[in-house]
Amino acid sequence: MCTQTQNSHCSGNPITVTLTDECPGACNNDPVHFDLSGIAYGKLAKSGEEEFQFFIKVVSEAVNGDGDLSLVEIKTGGASTTAWTPMKRMIGSTWNVGIQPNTQKPPFSLRLTSSTKKSVIAQNVIPPGWQPRSVYKSNVNFPSQL
């Protein structure tokens, strides 16, 4: 990470971030936890060394029947042999992951796992030709416990 103590991968260009939320307690078992977007990381790194210049952020809504999400994973390319990659919880129901657009291509599938370890898959929910800031509906949900 680029801080006041520079390392060889840093651009030397400082950025200003605004803190809008605080993680109660320890996040991800870290006593101090701070998330920066891929865009912010890209501005901190020297050109060509941006590890997460591209990232996907997803928000789940109306999770019904089985409690909170404990894990969201993404699979790229629609191939059945591609491994699921865990996403990181940013805040609430927002999850993100860094991607490499040259090798990780849509369609993207999402696997949502509840706190009781039940999973549902939104197969190819993010299509080829997807656009940033767009909404794609999966119409999958956990079975109702009624």
Image (spheres, rainbow, N blue to C red):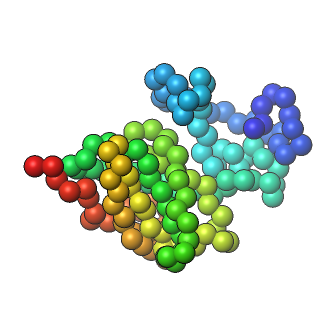
Asked whether 52 or 82 is in front, the reply is: 82
Q: Quadrant of residue 30?
A: top right
Work out which residue is located at the far right of the displayed protein and give it: 8
Residue 79 visible here: yes
The location of residue 52, given as percent across then percent down, is 67, 53
Rendered residue at 52%/77% (across/down): 79
The location of residue 32, given as percent across then percent down, is 60, 25
Rendered residue at 20%/57% (across/down): 143
Asked whether 64 or 23 is in front, the reply is: 64
Q: Is residue 96 above or below residue 111?
A: above
The location of residue 49, given as percent across then percent down, is 80, 54
7 relative to 142 in the view: left or right: right
Q: Is residue 22 above or below residue 141?
A: above
| Number of marks | 0
Q: Is residue 60 above or below residue 27?
A: below
Residue 129 visible here: no
Q: Quadrant of residue 123?
A: bottom left
73 relative to 44 in the view: left or right: left
Rendered residue at 52%/62% (across/down): 84
Rendered residue at 62%/60% (across/down): 99
Of the 4 image quadrants, the one containing the N terminus is top right
Work out which residue is located at the far left of the displayed protein and give it: 146
The location of residue 113, given as percent across then percent down, is 38, 52
